[in-house]
Each structure stands twice: as structure tokens, then as C-alpha cells.
Amino acid sequence: MRTLIMSGRNNLFSSEGENWEEAALISMRDAALSDTLVYSILRQIREENEKSGCFEKEQERIQVIEQLQKRLTRTQLSTFGIIEQLYMKEATMCLQIAFPRGIYAAFQHCFSPNENSTFERLVMEPLANVDSMERFSELHRNRAFLNELLEELTAELKPTRQKQLTAYSKMWDERIKGILRYGYRLGYAAGQSIMLEVDPSQT
């Protein structure tokens, strides 16, 4: 029996084995860097696409996905819903990974300007590193379950529907890249804001 991987932790402030500071920081992270912010970022990405002329491509994908959903059985539609939840969970986790690295980059650029603290080095490279499965274990477990469901659903579909499911998957992969980019960008802005608040002379 499959168990859906849920986001966050329950009853954080009474978790055994965690000190209060750690629990408070996790709670703050989950509250601020939540799926609500993910949706906000996705809307911003959509606005960017509209301005850059890429909006029609995404609209075509959305129409294809809507066609796919209309052709799924009730069981397949349930699986598709779980896949959607897993993509959202991955997006939220990626936001929570990228944001503090953006803060780190802001401070490093200020105090150690010669350091190579770019988005690629701080976010993309660690995620692609061979040690990332251990470092980001929850993210990899979520992705493994997601891929398992995609494979199962793909095997049940006819070639035309398989292409539509592939288009859906590609759309989400692009969205998650955007979430990582925006998470880093927001973190960098937060770091600059902190420095300005504490020491206005940093500007």
C-alpha cells in the first residue's frame, strides 16, 4: 500500500528530540516558505512568460493536460491527483532549499566578494551532486515516488495520452527550475534587506 509523503511536521513545538530553537526555525520556514508562496511564484513566472512571448506555449500544454484528464478513468485520475500533490511538495521543498542559499550569497557577496557564490554553485550543483541523495533525502524520496507513479500511469495509457503526460511532466520540471531561481532570488533580497536594516551603511 502506498503512503503519500506529506509536507512539514506535525506539532513541531512538542517534538521529542528537538530543541526549541530548531523547532521554531522549522515552523517559521514551513510557514513562510509554503505552497502559498509557491503559487505566488508560479503566477509571477506566468506573468514573465506573458511578457516574453512564451505564454502561448504554456497555454497549449495546459490545454493538452486538460484533454488528458478528461480521458482518464476514475482510478487514473486519482493517481494523477497524487502526482500533482507530489510535484507541489517538490516545488515547496526546492523553495526551502534555494531561499537560505540566496541569503548566504547576499552575505558572502558583501563580506567575501571574491567567493564564487552564484546560483549555479550554491543551488544547482549541490542538487546534482552525487551526495545529494543523502543531503536532500526527503526530496529524493518524493521524486522516486513521483517517478514510480508516472511510470505506472504511463504504462496504462495509449501513445497519444503518454505524450500528453510527458508534456505535463516537462511543464512541472520547468516550473520547479523557476521555483529554485525565484527562491534564490528572494533569499538574496532577504539577505540584503537584513544587512540594510542592521547597517544602512552597507548600501
Image (cartoon, grey):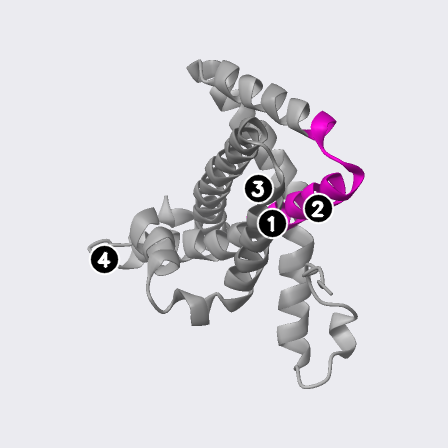
Q: Are marks 1 and 3 in contact (CB under 8 Å)?
A: yes
Residue wearing tag 1: 152
**Vertical position of residue 54 compared to residue 128: above or below:** above
- At label 1, which amino acid type do we have? Glu
Q: Residue 103 in magenta?
A: no
113 relative position to 135: left or right: left
Measured in 3D between alpha carbons, the distance from the residue under mark 3 to the one under mark 2, in whole angstroms, is: 11 Å
Q: Are marks 3 and 2 in contact (CB under 8 Å)?
A: no
Tell me which segment is drawn in magenta: 69-92
Q: Nearer the viewer, residue 77 or 61?
A: 77
Measured in 3D between alpha carbons, the distance from the residue under mark 4 to the one under mark 2, in whole angstroms, is: 45 Å
Query: Around disc 1, counting alpha carbons within 10 Å, would you say few (fewer than 14), some (14 to 19), or many (20 or more)?
Result: few
What residue is rendered at 30% in x and 54% in y? 121
- In terms of sequence position, does the residue under pointer 4 or pointer 2 come before the other? 2
- At label 4, which amino acid type do we have? Glu
Q: Which of 159 and 20 is in front in this view?
A: 159
Q: Mark 4 against mark 1, which lies toward the viewer?
A: 1
- Label 4 secondary element: loop
Q: Do the residues labelled 2 and 1 touch (CB within 8 Å)?
A: yes
Residue wearing tag 4: 115
Measured in 3D between alpha carbons, the distance from the residue under mark 4 to the one under mark 1, in whole angstroms, is: 45 Å
Residue wearing tag 3: 154
**Vertical position of residue 55 compared to residue 124: above or below:** above
- In terms of sequence position, does the residue under pointer 4 or pointer 1 come before the other? 4
Measured in 3D between alpha carbons, the distance from the residue under mark 2 to the one under mark 1, in whole angstroms, is: 9 Å
